[in-house]
Image (cartoon, rainbow, N blue to C red):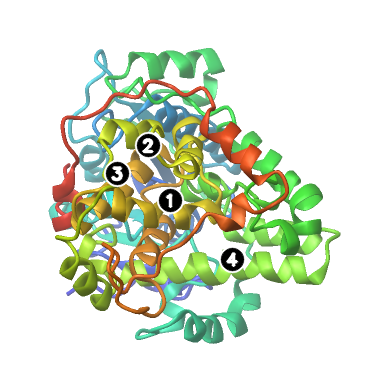
């Protein structure tokens, strides 16, 4: 049974964001409070750092923020490494401006450090981690809390409204919206906690990497030296770090929101998408900062309301769902009726089956699907209106529903900057069994509703746009010998 929160955290105004992950007590004799970040890579408006400072101030201890980047995380690539390192560099710079020490480690051949976060924890009073409900951040935090002999607290930094405030048992998007909307204003404003202790400047168990002193060329050298997938290139559409996030926030205010209600579903018109999901996934921005931008925009109320519903209802609903699931990336999360009908039709003829090579590279017999997949492969992102068609067609393009699920998750997680996320897993689950069942058809879908490409193809210029999008020059990504199906069918972490 986890221990109760110490008074300094339980009395904090944002205490509902915090939960104890183990039963150890805070150790006042530590050198510092350790704040281990994996995805919430921002120094400002970061409840994980704020909680650590709150606890550190109460103990009279400094906070030490730590971010490490391993080579062996699933799907490690130039694309992901570059984006993460850029965010981490700005994290260190902005922590220093806040008066908080931030240290980093980049795993590479000439700098191997084993068990580093455990060694850092040994000198700590307690450890603050992110409350992330999916993928690597969840696996590592839970395993760490079980093994380390220090108090570990998880802090939600991904949602505007702390999920704990909403209670348990919400069963639909409508019910979630009803419970979520009335309390949003309570969590819209926050002030960074000010440290009352000087930054930590004591001994460390290793020599840190100073990413805040690195140039772009230095970061490129880190990426090039890593033993990762170099066949998935950096996405020029999404500049790494705070600068890239601020560019997209400005674009949201000036270009996207004024017409959002009318253009958000038009994949042929790029001004209808905020393209903020990669920055939200890696915590470069948080929902409070995005909503402050929305509130300040000169845009119609209908557009602002619709965007807020996408960000705060749908995104946070998927985060809420993920917290109740043992493994949000696992096949058995989809609706029971959908599993039943898909498996009943698993033996149906599948003339549309494609090779994994064709699927990865967007070279199937389906032009519209190829246009969708090329966005993932080239840009590391896909327009929301294309994702539903993309996901549903995979069911017919693979040998059985389990392989379809694993394929969709694999393509999403390996290629997309916003993959490995509660929202993207929730969206994939919706393609397999969201909503109500339809009539039982003769195809591999059974009662799962299908989706045409009409919302794109029937727009003015739609056929030309699809043809051009499907023919974009693409990188030659490596093709694995097989899918990592165990991860997506059993939920067993590969780390």
Q: CA distance from mark 2 to mark 4?
A: 31 Å
Question: Residue 341: image x %, image y %?
Answer: 23, 73
Cβ atoms at labels 1 and 4 below 8 Å apart: no
Q: Which residue is mark 1?
A: 390
Mark 2 Cα within 10 Å, few/some/many (few <14, many 20+)?
many
Closest to the observer, 186 or 464: 464
* Mark 3 or mark 4, earlier in chain: 4
Residue 288 vertical placement versus 216 (above, below) = below
Mark 1 secondary-structure assignment? helix
* Mark 1 or mark 4, earlier in chain: 4
Q: CA distance from mark 2 to mark 3?
A: 17 Å
Q: Which residue is mark 2?
A: 364
- Residue 310: mark in rendering: 4
Q: Nearer the viewer, mark 2 or mark 4?
A: 2
Q: Which residue is mark 3?
A: 410
Task: Specify whether residue 97 is in view.
Answer: no
Q: Nearer the viewer, mark 3 or mark 4?
A: 3
Looking at the rendered image, the quarter that the C terminus falls into is: top left
Q: CA distance from mark 1 to mark 3?
A: 13 Å
Q: CA distance from mark 1 to mark 4?
A: 20 Å
Q: What residue do we see at 77% from left, 52% from top?
A: 253
Looking at the rendered image, the quarter that the N terminus falls into is: bottom left
Task: Specify whether residue 362 is in view.
Answer: yes
Left or right, residue 221 beside residue 295:
left
């Amino acid at each position: 049974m986890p221990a109760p929160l110490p008074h300094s955290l339980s009395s904090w105004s944002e205490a509902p964001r915090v939960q104890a992950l183990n039963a150890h007590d805070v150790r006042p004799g530590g050198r510092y409070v350790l704040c281990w970040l994996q995805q919430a890579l921002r120094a400002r408006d970061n409840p994980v750092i704020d909680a650590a400072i709150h606890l550190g101030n109460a103990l009279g201890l400094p906070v030490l923020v730590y971010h490490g980047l391993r080579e062996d995380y699933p799907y490690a690539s130039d694309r992901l490494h570059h984006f993460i390192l850029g965010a981490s560099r700005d994290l260190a710079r902005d922590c220093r401006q806040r008066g908080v020490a931030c240290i980093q480690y980049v795993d590479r051949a000439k700098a191997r450090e084993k068990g580093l976060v455990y060694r850092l924890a040994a000198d700590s009073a307690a450890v603050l981690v992110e409350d992330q409900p999916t993928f690597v951040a969840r696996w590592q935090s839970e395993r760490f809390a079980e093994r380390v002999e220090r108090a570990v607290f998880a802090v939600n930094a991904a949602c505007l409204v702390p999920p704990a405030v909403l209670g348990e048992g919400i069963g639909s998007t409508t019910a979630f919206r009803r419970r979520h909307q009335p309390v949003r204003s309570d969590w819209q404003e926050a002030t960074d906690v000010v440290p009352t202790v000087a930054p930590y400047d004591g001994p460390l168990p290793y020599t840190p990497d100073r990413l805040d002193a690195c140039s772009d060329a230095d970061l490129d050298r880190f990426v090039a030296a890593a033993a990762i997938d170099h066949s998935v290139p950096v996405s020029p559409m999404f500049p790494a770090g705070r600068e890239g996030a601020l560019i997209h926030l400005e674009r949201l205010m000036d270009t996207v929101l004024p017409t959002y209600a009318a253009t958000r579903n038009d994949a042929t018109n790029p001004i209808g998408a905020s393209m903020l999901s990669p920055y939200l996934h890696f915590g470069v921005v948080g929902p409070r900062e995005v909503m402050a931008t929305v509130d300040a925009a000169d845009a119609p109320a209908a557009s602002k309301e619709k965007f807020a519903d996408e960000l705060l209802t749908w995104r946070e609903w998927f985060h809420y769902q993920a917290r109740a699931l043992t493994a949000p990336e696992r096949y058995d999360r989809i609706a029971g009726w959908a599993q039943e009908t898909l498996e009943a039709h698993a033996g149906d003829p599948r003339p549309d089956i494609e090779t994994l090579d064709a699927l990865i590279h967007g070279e199937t017999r389906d032009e519209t699907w190829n246009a969708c997949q090329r966005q993932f492969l080239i840009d590391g992102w896909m327009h929301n209106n294309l994702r539903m068609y993309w996901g549903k067609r995979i069911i017919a393009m693979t040998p059985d529903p389990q392989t379809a699920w694993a394929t969709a998750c694999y393509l999403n997680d390996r290629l997309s900057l916003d993959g490995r996320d509660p929202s993207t897993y929730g969206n994939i689950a919706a393609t397999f069994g969201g909503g109500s069942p339809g009539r039982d058809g003769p195809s591999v879908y059974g009662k799962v509703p299908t989706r045409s490409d009409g919302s794109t193809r029937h727009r003015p210029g739609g056929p030309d746009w699809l043809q051009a999008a499907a023919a974009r020059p693409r990188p030659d990504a490596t093709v694995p010998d097989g899918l990592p199906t165990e991860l997506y069918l059993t939920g067993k972490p590969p780390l």
